[in-house]
Amino acid sequence: MSEATRDPAADPQAAAATTPEEPEEPRGFWARYARANSLVVTLLAFVAAMVLGGILIAIADTRTQDASHYFFQYPWDTFRYGFAAIWHGYVALFQGAIFNPHTAAKGTWAGYVGPISETLTNATPLILGGLSVGLAFRAGLFNIGGQGQVIMGAVCAGFIGFHYHLPPGLHLLLGIIAGALGGAAWGGLAGLLKAKTGAHEVITTIMLNYVAVSLLAYLLSVKGFQAPPYGQAISNPVYKSAQLPPLLGSSVRVHGGLILALLAAAFVSWLLNRSTLGFRLKAVGANQYASRTAGMSVEGSYITVMLIAGALCGLAGVSQILGTNSQLTGDIDAGIGFDAITVALLGRANAKGIVAAGLLFGALHAGGTQMQSATGTPIDLVQVIQSLIVLFIAAPMLIRAIFRLKGTAAGVGGGELAKGWNG
Amino acid sequence: MTTLAQSPDELTVEHKVTRAPVSPAQRYAGSVSLLVLGLVTIWRFGIDGHHDQRASIRFGALNAAHVPHFTVPAAPVAWVAGVLTIVLGIIWVVVPRRRLFGLVMGLGVGLFVVALLCWLASASSFVSVDVVGLLTSTIGYSVPLILGALCGVMCERSGVINIAIEGQMLAGAWAAALIGTVLGVTAGMLAGALAGALIGWLLAVFAIRYLVNQVVLGVVLNVFAAGLTGFFYDAFMQTNPEKWNQPPLLDPVKIPGLGDIPVLGPLLFDTSVIVYLMYVLIVLVDIWLFRTRWGLRTRAVGEHPKAADTVGIRVLAMRYRNVIIGGAIAGVGGSYFIFQVGQFQKNITSGAGFIALAALIFGRWSPRGAVAAALLFGFASAMQNMLSINAPSIPSNFVAMLPYLATILAVAGLVGKVRAPAADGEPYVKE
């Protein structure tokens, strides 16, 4: 404890001062390894998380547990079975996420593209949510209210989807718009409160999450929303005309929400890098006082960015209700709001990174399902791996300490975002 | 003194009483909401109420002996309450006093609750409302909230934002179930505290040593705790509950003497050990934070770490200790779930850590305020529970929203200024 207080590594300025950036190309593996950039830190964080996850798999394996009872007589068995469990677990993870030779051997289309389709299906809302959180990050806000915004998006899109009969294209379009508006309203409320009263967005968005959860629970008990025979908390199904079309044929689940997510990523990328508004948002995020002095409306930026962020989360809700599922349930948000935070952090709050991170976590979710059914390893492992990756990335100094790296890459969530309730 | 050179006129001091101004939003929104509340009370419980029945109010369970018990006419009570609320609303708009805003709004809501309870109790001759039961369930809901909020007070007063209260509780609950099954209640509670402290330690290390943004960190630790406990639940506890997930229940312990007081006895002094522990912790944290040297230093570190460092207080060590002890308190709060329910389930805390966070903020980062807010939120949960059983026609989900809406209004400044410790969430780096 007291050692930690005196550790020079705890001082980023000192660390930056001792390792100035050098343009020359490093030679040799170790030299390159030592000059770790953020990509290397990301990869190593992934490796470290997978190693810790592997230990958990071994602990959860019954054969390994049995072997550990006679560990001191014959330790080899424990290791053998443990490594076998880890191997089988991660193979199943791969098969569930990328390609599964067993199902492909059946020769059907779904057998070939099923795993990829699952990965993309899981990645779609994660990308949208990650874009929302990442965009807010860049404007200096922490949108922790993804859950509420996803729920409100899904509620609005779902309502359009099952309450009205409209021609196919129009119906879908209106559903998407309604979802985006629902999320934008919920996010914009937090932005408005922040701009007008200074209420910290973390607190208001957490509270709005629970308000949305209660609101959804209420709606699912109202006739007109709830599906007959009114026994279960589930809504009417969305009409076919409002559903996002399947992308790889109707035998697999991946749907048009993915296109929506990629378009949104392109939009966010344009917004942040090419537009005046994006410049203003980033300026406010970097230094609100300087921005105000320069004549920018800080309050306006807060409201705008939360409206857009909310709309993006609302689209994640659209993907959930008009794509992946067709009926609203109490857990329609499927934890996307909080997973999105990890996606945004892993993607370092830029559009390309978020798409990649969303795909990675989507793959982990898809693989986790397969792993659970094939080897019995609980799917919660995915959550653990996900949080560990982000923990390691958020603390790049820790990864450097573990792998003995030197470098200057700063993680998102480091110094530039460290501010308190009053900031 | 230089007063010699001054004339008597210059020495006169005028005292001018200035009142904190009330914003128009507070003035008119407060008034309108009181008027609406009053009208709803009159319409729903007065005009539309049960006129043929008297409300039957009990102070004890149905089967208990010598229960104080009385009946009141429900509809007139609702009329009186509604009219009083409207009068309050009119008084508020005519003579608003900023300091009294909370009191006025609280009175309005309180009158509404009284009318609601009378209305419930008069639904038929078989129905009666047990006030002690309602308050007992309030305390039941409040215990984890209070412990979680106390954890938050410890952490945030020392300058570390703790969004991971939920994760600390969940870890505590899991460890309490596991160790409680294997080694018994006492060991289970200790294990719960230890597991909470462990997540607290992680929070401290990453926030203080690795300077990770504390809000990010809290969210990630919540995901981590939920994932890890869920993983082990599926791996061991679900398949073999007799061995790993059958912790004993905590029986209520009656304190001799105090437990025999008519209404308060069964309410406060005939409950589980964790509740008694909570009483002690509330007093301890309050005294500790405001009456001891350590507490003074903690608050100094949370408000102005540089100044504290200058006078020789070890800022980081102070923060480490507070966060870890806070984690332990939240862990005990998590174990309360276990010894009430008798088994661990995935995500058993179901957001209690976030309500505790809300209570902490609503209570303005002070132990007493946090406890009061937690009790208020516990009461809202108890009401919601009672409504969903006794009056399905009233959407109880809206009652469930109230704590969160109240917290939003509080941070938006409608209930007075809410201010966090100045250095809350800002890592301290020695120069």
Image (tube, coloured by chain):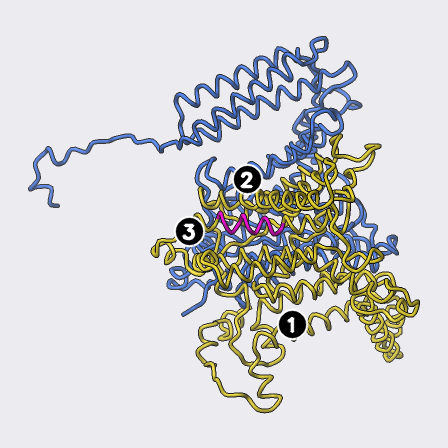
Chain colours: A yellow, B blue
Label 3 resides on the chain identified as: A
Q: Which residues are magenta?
A: A303-313
Identify the element where label 3 is drawn.
helix
* Tag 1 subunit: A
Tag 1: residue type?
Ala
Q: Are marks 1 and 3 on the same chain?
A: yes
Residue B202 locus on image (x, y percent): 61, 63
Label 1 crowd bin: few (<14), some (14–19), many (20+), radius 10 Å: many
B94 or A349, nearer to the observer? A349
Residue A298: give its label: 3
User: Could you say where residue B359 lies in the image, as x and y percent from the top left?
Assistant: 57, 42
Residue A406: % across, % down: 54, 81
How far separated are the C-alphas under marks 2 and 1?
37 Å
Up the image or down, B84 lies above or below B287; here it is: above
- Chain for mark 2? B
User: Which label sits in the foreground, 1 or 3?
Assistant: 3
List the residue tagged with mark 2: B407
Q: For numbered disc 1, what is the local secondary structure?
A: helix
Q: Which residue is mark 1?
A: A45
Q: CA distance from mark 1 to mark 3?
A: 35 Å
